[in-house]
């Protein structure tokens, strides 16, 4: 129980781990959504969710599938759901696009865009 309390506390949760399914312990094969994005940048990812953050958004999970095509990932999810019948297992499908989350990160991205000339790709609508 102490390990579960620590993991719950580390994620900033204020829920009761014994009664809230979103507080399930993070399994050994689980990785964070951020780690998945770093591993598979630009790819589509199907993740079996193992933990949620304080805002009830997926924070950790097990990678089920990844690839360049969103349609293949959605087909995989559809097959998983149809094979398992009615399941309460949460899944998360997303494209691994790195995002700036702080002002400093945003400044670095903008500077890199300016430096590489990528800003020229933008046009006025």
Image (tube, rainbow, N blue to C red):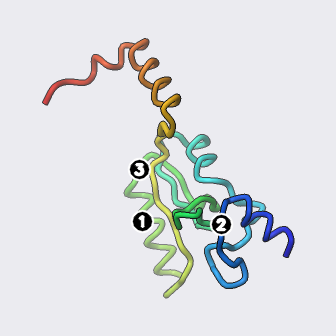
List the residue tagged with mark 2: 13
Q: CA distance from mark 3 to mark 1?
A: 10 Å
Which numbered dot is residue 75?
Answer: 1
Q: Residues within 10 Å of mark 1 (few under 14, many from 20)?
A: few
Given this view, does label 3 or label 2 mark the residue nearer the observer?
A: 2
Q: Is residue 100 above or below residue 26?
A: above
Residue shown at 66%/60% (left/top)?
12
User: SS for tag 3?
Assistant: loop
User: SS for tag 2?
Assistant: loop
Point out the tag, 3 or 1, that comes first from the N-terminus. Answer: 3
Residue 65 lies in what quarter of the image?
A: bottom right
List the residue tagged with mark 3: 69
Residue shown at 48%/77% (left/top)?
81
Which numbered dot is residue 96?
Answer: none
Q: CA distance from mark 3 to mark 2?
A: 34 Å
Decide if residue 40 is on the left or right side of residue 62: left
Furthest toward the right, the residue is 2
Q: Residues within 10 Å of mark 2 (few under 14, many from 20)?
A: some
Residue shown at 37%/57% (left/top)?
71
Point out the tag, 2 or 1, that comes first from the N-terminus. Answer: 2
Given this view, does label 2 or label 1 mark the residue nearer the observer?
A: 2
Decide if residue 60 is on the left or right side of residue 108: right
Q: CA distance from mark 2 to mark 1?
A: 33 Å
Residue 88 position in % (x across, y down): 54, 82
Q: Is residue 16 above or below residue 98?
A: below
Q: Is residue 122 above or below residue 92?
A: above
Residue 120 lies in what quarter of the image?
A: top left
Residue shown at 43%/72% (left/top)?
78
User: SS for tag 1?
Assistant: helix
């Amino acid at each position: 129980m102490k390990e579960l309390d620590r993991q719950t506390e580390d994620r900033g949760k204020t829920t009761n781990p014994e009664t809230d399914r979103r507080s399930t312990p993070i399994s050994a094969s689980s990785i964070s959504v951020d780690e998945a994005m770093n591993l598979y940048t630009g790819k589509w990812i199907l993740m079996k969710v193992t933990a949620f953050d304080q805002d009830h958004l997926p924070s950790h999970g097990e990678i089920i599938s990844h690839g360049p095509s969103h349609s293949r990932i959605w087909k995989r999810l559809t097959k998983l759901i149809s094979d398992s019948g009615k399941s309460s297992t949460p899944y998360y499908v997303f494209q691994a696009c790195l995002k700036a989350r702080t002002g400093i990160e945003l400044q670095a991205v903008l500077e890199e865009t300016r430096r590489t000339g990528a800003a020229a790709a933008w046009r006025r609508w």
